[in-house]
Image (cartoon, rainbow, N blue to C red):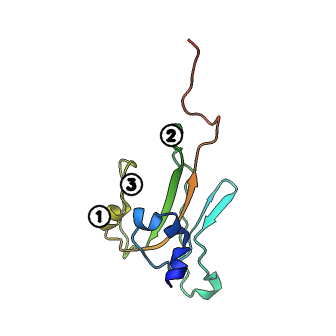
Amino acid sequence: MAGGRDRDPLVVGRVVGDVLDPFVRTTNIRVSYGARTVSNGCELKPSMVTNQPRSRTRGDVLREPSATMGIHRFVFVLFQQMGRQTVYAPGWRQNFNTRDFAELYNLGPPVAAVYFNCQREAGSGGRRMYPN
């Protein structure tokens, strides 16, 4: 299966390696933003799964990247929790370490992940220059 892993977008995009250790995808994850949707391409159809999860996570605020920082990679990782527990958001995002987060909360390996790259559009804010 090495040939298939070489074409895996998470491997090609260096998410596996930089952010995550290799893992086996066992579920579907889909992220929608604006009119676009990114999916991990899981081939299982809902009718093929006997115990379908009934969880929906929503949110409408993603921090915009700093205008001077170039291209950003947003990585969404789904972990299966072994039981109910409270997971606290870290107080910072800079240099966030997914492996440390998973270890802190005893989450085990991911069950799904998806990512996309983005960059601020010209004229969408950022530093303002005012004449003297």
Badge 2 element:
loop
Q: Amino acid at mark 2?
A: Ser
Residue 119 sits above or below residue 109 on the image: above
User: Is disc 3 surrounded by few (<14), some (14 to 19) or many (20+) residues within 10 Å?
Assistant: few
Mark closest to the chain's N terminus, 3 or 2 = 2
- 53 sits to left or right of 16: right
Task: Locate residue 102, reporting x and y percent.
Answer: 35, 66
Percent across and percent down for residue 84 are 38, 71
Q: Look at 65% across and 62% down and name the residue there.
A: 37
Proximity of marks 2 and 1: CB atoms separated by less than 8 Å: no
Outermost residue toward the top in this view: 132
Out of 13 and 125, give the one closest to the viewer. 13
Q: Toward which corner of the image does residue 45 lie, by quadrant?
A: bottom right
Mark sitting on residue 90: none
Residue named by callout 2: 66
Residue carrying label 1: 104
Gap between marks 3 and 2 measured at Cα: 21 Å
**For marks 1 and 3 on the same chain, the one whose residue lies earlier in the sequence:** 3
Look at the image and tell me whether residue 12 can be seen.
Answer: yes
Foreground pick, 31 / 96: 96
Element type at mark 3: loop
Query: Is the residue marked by circle 2 packed among few (<14), some (14-19), or many (20+) residues within 10 Å?
Result: some
In whole angstroms, how far apart are the C-alphas of marks 2 and 1? Answer: 29 Å
Tell me the kind of residue under disc 3. Ala
**Which element type, helix, strand or loop, lies under badge 1?**
helix
- Say whether residue 92 is left or right of residue 118: left
Q: Which residue is mark 3?
A: 89
Q: Where 84 falls versus 100 (above or below)? A: below
- The residue sitting at 53% across, 81% down in the picture is 3
- Residue 64 locus on image (x, y percent): 54, 44
- Are the residues tagged 3 and 2 within 8 Å (C-beta)? no
